[in-house]
């Protein structure tokens, strides 16, 4: 078995695709409208769905926004240079909600950003992580 994707419901599909592709550097892998169901699915990621877990962005045409609830935590992305990546994210209009720094009780360097719908994305500097 393998993890295939994580699904997030989004209010503005184009804005979300822009965030994940232009700010986080993912690629739009595929996108399809389902007119009978009044929704669109877009899959973004860093590589082929056959070899990588990806993110499914689900846009229900009749819903402008969602309540995130308190069960969802975050999506984690490994990055090569977290300080440079956070600088680039801010330069391109993204919001860094926790600047890079050590995780509590660890030497792993992390940061957090939020996507246009408020979903939290944890950035982990892969050269510093404990695992």
Image (tube, rainbow, N blue to C red):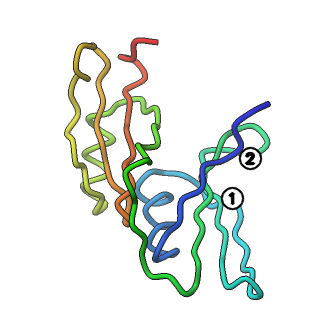
Q: Are marks 2 and 1 in contact (CB under 8 Å)?
A: yes
Q: Nearer the viewer, residue 57 or 86?
A: 57
Asked whether, in this view, residue 4 is left or right of residue 113, the answer is right
Residue at image location 58% in from the left, 63% down from the top: 57
Residue at image location 72% in from the left, 79% down from the top: 33
Q: Position of residue 98 (x, y in %)?
A: 21, 41
**Badge count:** 2
Q: Position of residue 91 (x, y in %)?
A: 25, 57
Please tell me whether mark 2 sits on a helix, a strand or a loop.
loop
Q: Nearer the viewer, residue 75 or 26?
A: 75
Q: Residues within 10 Å of mark 1 (few under 14, many from 20)?
A: some
Q: Residues within 10 Å of mark 2 (few under 14, many from 20)?
A: some
Would you name the residue on which mark 2 appears? 49
Give the position of the N terminus as an image quadrant.
top right
Asked whether, in this view, residue 118 is left or right of residue 96, the answer is right
Residue at image location 37% in from the left, 49% down from the top: 120
Would you name the residue on which mark 1 appears? 29
Q: Nearer the viewer, residue 61 or 114?
A: 61
Q: Nearer the viewer, residue 69 or 121?
A: 69
Please tell me whether mark 1 sits on a helix, a strand or a loop.
strand
Vertical order, 64 against 66 (above or below): below
Asked whether, in this view, residue 104 is left or right of residue 76, the answer is left
């Amino acid at each position: 078995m393998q993890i295939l994707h994580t699904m997030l419901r989004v209010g503005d599909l184009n804005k979300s695709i822009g965030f994940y592709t232009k700010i986080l550097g993912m690629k739009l892998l595929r996108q399809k409208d389902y007119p009978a169901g009044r929704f669109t699915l877009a899959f973004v990621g860093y590589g082929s769905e056959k070899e990588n877990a990806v993110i499914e962005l689900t846009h229900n045409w009749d819903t402008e926004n969602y309540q995130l609830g308190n069960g969802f935590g975050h999506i984690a992305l490994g990055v090569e240079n977290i300080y440079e990546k956070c600088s680039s994210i801010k330069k391109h209009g993204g919001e860094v909600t926790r600047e890079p720094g050590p995780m509590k009780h660890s030497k792993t360097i992390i940061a957090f950003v939020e996507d246009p719908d408020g979903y939290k994305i944890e950035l982990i500097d892969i050269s510093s992580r404990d695992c």
